[in-house]
Amino acid sequence: MSITLEHYLGAGIVYVDGRDIGNAADVDVAIEVEEKAVPNFRGGGGNSGSLDRIKGVKLSMNLYDFNNDNLALALRGVNSAVTDTPITTEVLTTPAALDVLLDTAKIIDTTVPPSVTGPSGTPTYVLDTDYEVKAGGIYVLASGSITVSSTIEVGYTPKAGNALEALVSSGQEVKVVVDGINEAESGKPFRLTFHKWKPSPTSGLSAIGADYGSFPLNGEVLIDTTKNGTSVSQYFKREAAS
């Protein structure tokens, strides 16, 4: 009998409900098995019967693209669009001590100078004397003329983008397709299709670090009851070129 050797070094693109999720590594499948057994009491030990039952199927990966669509999967979040429509007046209140950031409702487009005034537009405060502009808000300088526990009005242009509210949904159930190649076999194509995957909240998310960031995404491959027929998996399938 001849032996066909096929070494494996996988690469590819992961799609979630048809969306390319970017650079994904360590895409792993783990199958948990529960064994049921009938002990042999007739002498000699061992079991007289056994059954392996699928307890669960896990799909995990490590993502390197920090867009809010990916983070919504990882944080069970909901995204909403943020426009660059100018905000004419946003009222902020200074605390009991200055040299402090007053965070605005939206990220500031720092290329467009904001206006910072007192109530009803008076007085007009001076950039880099009374305050500094940060993307995250207005930084009030203690050396300036803005006083503690006072009200200021800010007009600014937001940065267009999107906002993610974390941990507000019960989690998505999505279809995952891995469109891959075996680089050890001259780019031989394969495809993995997970019919229904429910990711769990990520166990770790690096906000600031010395290296490029990534975050783990793990979840349960659920049974898809719409997949029926002899020898048809309700979990996932793998296709490969010959």
Image: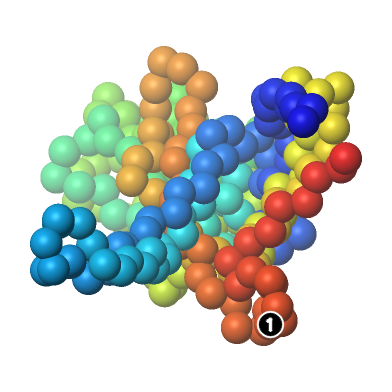
Q: Position of residue 168 (x, y in %)?
A: 40, 70
Q: Is residue 234 left or right of residue 99?
A: right
Q: Quadrant of residue 140?
A: top left
Q: Is residue 213 above or below residue 108?
A: above
User: How many marks are shown on the rendered structure?
Assistant: 1
Specify few, some or many for label 1: CA neighbours under 10 Å numbering under 14, 14-19, or 20 or more: few
Rendered image coloring scheme:
rainbow
Residue 53 appears in the rendering = yes
The residue wearing badge 1 is 228
Q: Which of 47/84 is in front?
A: 47
Q: Which of 137/78 is in front?
A: 78
Q: Amino acid at mark 1?
A: Asn
Q: Position of residue 86 (x, y in %)?
A: 65, 56
Q: Is residue 150 left or right of residue 110?
A: left
Name which residue lies at 27% across and 35% down: 100
Q: Quadrant of residue 194?
A: bottom right
In the current view of this chain or complex, which residue is farthest to the top? 210
Q: Secondary structure at mark 1?
A: loop
Q: In the rendered image, which quarter contains the N terminus?
A: top right
Name which residue lies at 26% across and 30% down: 99
Residue 75 appears in the rendering = no
Q: Position of residue 192 (x, y in %)?
A: 70, 51
Q: Quadrant of residue 177?
A: bottom right
Q: In the rendered image, which quarter contains the C terminus?
A: top right
Q: Which of 220/17 is in front?
A: 220
In the current view of this chain or complex, which residue is farthest to the front? 43
Name which residue lies at 26% across and 67% down: 48
Q: Which of 149/101 is in front?
A: 101
Name which residue lies at 22% across and 35% down: 98
